[in-house]
Image (cartoon, helix red, strand yellow):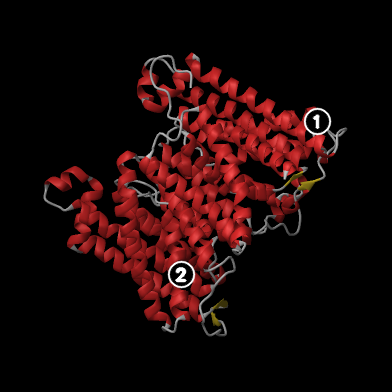
């Protein structure tokens, strides 16, 4: 039970990073990214490719950073003249294209079988101490990401992002370059998402295209809408909340003796119902964005 | 060669009705309704359930289509109208959430395995060297008939005039005494019925499972955006272009270009092709291939 709890906590930390990253795009920049999982995949495949071709840990980070910067840049680039909902559809399509390419170019990525046997982050430890080490690493990276996000949104750059979300034309008129704001926001948040993917690959020791389904993106969306758009703590809290609920659905299923479909259905109902409920009745989420005064949310 | 035409026509008729519905509902409600792709799967599932309950195919299809229309109107009244008051992007996320809840309902009631109609299996006919089954001919006929009825409705009746007026200028339409809310309700019902019919036609040629709706989503979006979202008959052209591209990608031998005998792309790239077309359209012709009255992109 204790080991399971540590596993859940590690997944919470990883999803928190993804939620922080998406929250920076959606909550602060107003960029409706529906392809978030592709950025996660960049990090995961960075680790996996470095392992497959024996390039070592450091070049894995380089591949992850390079891939995620390229994909984020492409996402920002197609959004030039589009309104947010159109852009959302385009990012959804691009993320699917990335997944299809990864599935079919087996010579490079191992295809649908994926790449397995990736070295863990702390190979010298084993068993429970390794798990605790993984948790410590995830927690530390999450903390760094959280502090970086908070610093970024408190800065003048963060104010620019918010202005772009609220009044893009006003932002332009006072001298902000909308395109470079978008690009910067996507690339920075892309790094956070890629970091989550990179650690995930080393933790699970397996990377495959099945981890890149759009349904994961929708899950991250639910986390930030429930936690509160435009609030970093909200994003982290939303990720922990949903991950914990999901982790305990199978136990409820066993307790009530329900069929296996119940778990998948319950997840969908929680994500969908959570989104609908919070949009209709508590649009600010559990932790509303702090507006005015010294914004330090 | 004629087989190619048949393949394109069949794929186009898979997408056409749903894309026309998507475009029609967008022209009035001004948000891309993701749940529409699920209405297609819902129509097919309902028709199958009714057929299993003992109704013949035609009445069960008609009843299923009508039920989906009613469900769409209810969802629109209860959820989408309120979400639209917040913003079109919010309504899009809401429609995504609704489609996830619908998936969960399918999973619980019907289960994860695919379902199909109880139809006689017939020998394929040979027309000009192309193989085509009776069900496929029938599906082409139904699609053509449904599109024609919709076009007559849109261009020759009072309701159609109201629809076009409301789509062009909602405020002005209101001022001239058109009941725009009623018109919108009618369009929501009609588009859901078209989508449900589209789903039933797809299932007549094969099967339906809980993934069908989400798998249809992006090709349908591609067709609708290519035709110019909000220009329903443009979606017919969009569907044909997408179907042609998908069929070409899998049927063309790229060998001569690459200096080898036979090089075919994997079949999965067919969908990737349509997503790439979607992204390219959004980049260069976000208003679609055809001249239309779409003002907002």
Residue B167 visible somewhere in the drawing = yes
Q: Which chain carries label 1?
A: A
Neighbourhood count class around disc 1 (C-alpha, 10 Å): few under 14, some 14–19, many 20 upward: some
Quarter holding the N terminus of chain B is bottom right
Residue at image location 49% in from the left, 23% down from the top? A181
Tag 2 residue? B44
Q: What element carries label 1?
A: helix
Q: Position of residue A102 (x, y in %)?
A: 68, 47
Viewer-side residue, B206 vs A23: A23
Viewer-side residue, A24 vs B269: A24
Residue at image location 31% in from the left, 45% down from the top? B82
Q: Position of residue A132 (x, y in %)?
A: 76, 33
Quarter holding the C terminus of chain B is top left
Task: Work out how far the residue at label 2 is from the one at label 1, CA to CA, in angstroms.
Answer: 50 Å
Q: Is residue B290 above or below residue A149?
A: below
Viewer-side residue, A112 vs B205: A112
Locate residue B151 relative to residue A287 in the image: left or right: left
Q: Is residue B157 above or below residue B123?
A: above
Q: Mark 2 lies on which chain?
A: B
Q: Where is residue B106 in the image (x, y as percent from the top left)?
A: 50, 64
Residue at image location 46% in from the left, 61% down from the top? B15
Q: What element carries label 2?
A: helix
Residue A57 - label: 1
């Amino acid at each position: 039970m204790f080991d399971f709890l540590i596993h859940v906590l590690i997944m919470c930390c990883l999803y928190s990073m993804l939620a922080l990253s998406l929250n920076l795009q959606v909550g602060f920049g107003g960029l409706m990214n529906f392809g978030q999982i592709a950025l996660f995949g960049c990090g995961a495949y960075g680790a996996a490719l470095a392992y497959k071709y024996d390039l070592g840990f450091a070049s894995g980070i380089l591949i992850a950073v390079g891939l995620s910067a390229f994909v984020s840049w492409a996402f920002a680039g197609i959004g030039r003249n589009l309104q947010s909902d159109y852009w959302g559809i385009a990012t959804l399509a691009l993320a699917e294209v990335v997944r299809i390419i990864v599935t079919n170019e087996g010579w490079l990525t191992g295809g649908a079988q994926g790449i397995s046997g990736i070295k863990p982050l702390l190979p010298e430890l084993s068993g429970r101490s390794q798990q605790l080490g993984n948790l410590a690493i995830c927690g530390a990276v999450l903390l760094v990401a959280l502090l970086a996000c908070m610093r970024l949104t408190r800065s003048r750059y963060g104010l620019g992002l918010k202005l772009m979300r609220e009044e893009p034309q006003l932002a332009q008129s006072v001298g902000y370059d909308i395109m470079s704001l978008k690009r910067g926001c996507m690339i920075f948040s892309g790094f956070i998402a890629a970091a989550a993917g990179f650690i995930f690959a080393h933790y699970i020791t397996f990377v495959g295209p099945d981890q890149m389904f759009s349904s994961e993106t929708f899950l991250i969306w639910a986390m930030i809408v429930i936690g509160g758009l435009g609030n970093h703590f909200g994003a982290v809290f939303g990720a922990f909340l949903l991950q914990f609920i999901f982790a305990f659905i199978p136990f409820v299923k066993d307790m009530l003796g329900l069929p296996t479909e119940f778990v998948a259905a319950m997840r969908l109902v929680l994500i969908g119902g959570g989104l609908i409920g919070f949009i209709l009745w508590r649009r600010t989420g559990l932790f509303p964005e702090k507006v005015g005064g010294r914004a330090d949310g | 060669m004629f087989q190619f035409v048949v393949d394109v026509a069949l794929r186009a008729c898979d997408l056409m009705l749903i894309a026309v519905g998507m475009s029609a509902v967008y022209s009035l409600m001004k948000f891309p309704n993701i749940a529409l792709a699920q209405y297609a799967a819902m129509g097919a599932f309902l028709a199958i359930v009714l057929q299993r309950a003992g109704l013949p195919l035609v009445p069960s299809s008609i009843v299923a289509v009508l039920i989906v229309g009613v469900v769409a109107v209810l969802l629109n009244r209860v959820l989408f109208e309120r979400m639209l008051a917040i913003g079109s992007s919010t309504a899009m996320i809401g429609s995504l959430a609704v489609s996830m809840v619908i998936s969960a309902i399918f999973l619980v009631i019907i289960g994860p395995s695919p379902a199909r109609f109880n139809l006689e299996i017939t020998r394929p006919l040979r027309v000009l060297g192309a193989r085509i089954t009776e069900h496929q001919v029938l599906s082409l006929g139904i699609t053509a008939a449904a599109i024609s009825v919709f076009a007559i409705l849109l261009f020759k009746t009072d309701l159609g005039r109201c629809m076009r007026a409301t789509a062009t200028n909602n405020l002005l339409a209101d001022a001239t005494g058109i009941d725009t809310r009623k018109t919108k309700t009618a369009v929501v019902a009609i588009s859901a019925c078209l989508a449900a019919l589209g789903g039933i036609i797809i299932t007549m040629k094969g099967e339906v499972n809980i993934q069908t709706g989400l798998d249809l989503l992006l090709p349908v979006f591609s067709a609708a955006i290519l035709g110019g979202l909000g220009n329903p008959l443009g979606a017919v052209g969009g569907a044909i272009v997408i179907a042609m591209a998908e069929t070409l990608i899998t049927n063309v031998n790229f060998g001569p270009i690459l200096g080898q005998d036979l090089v075919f792309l994997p079949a999965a790239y067919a969908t990737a092709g349509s997503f790439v077309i979607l992204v390219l359209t959004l980049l260069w012709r976000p208003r679609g291939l055809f001249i239309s009255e779409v003002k907002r992109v």
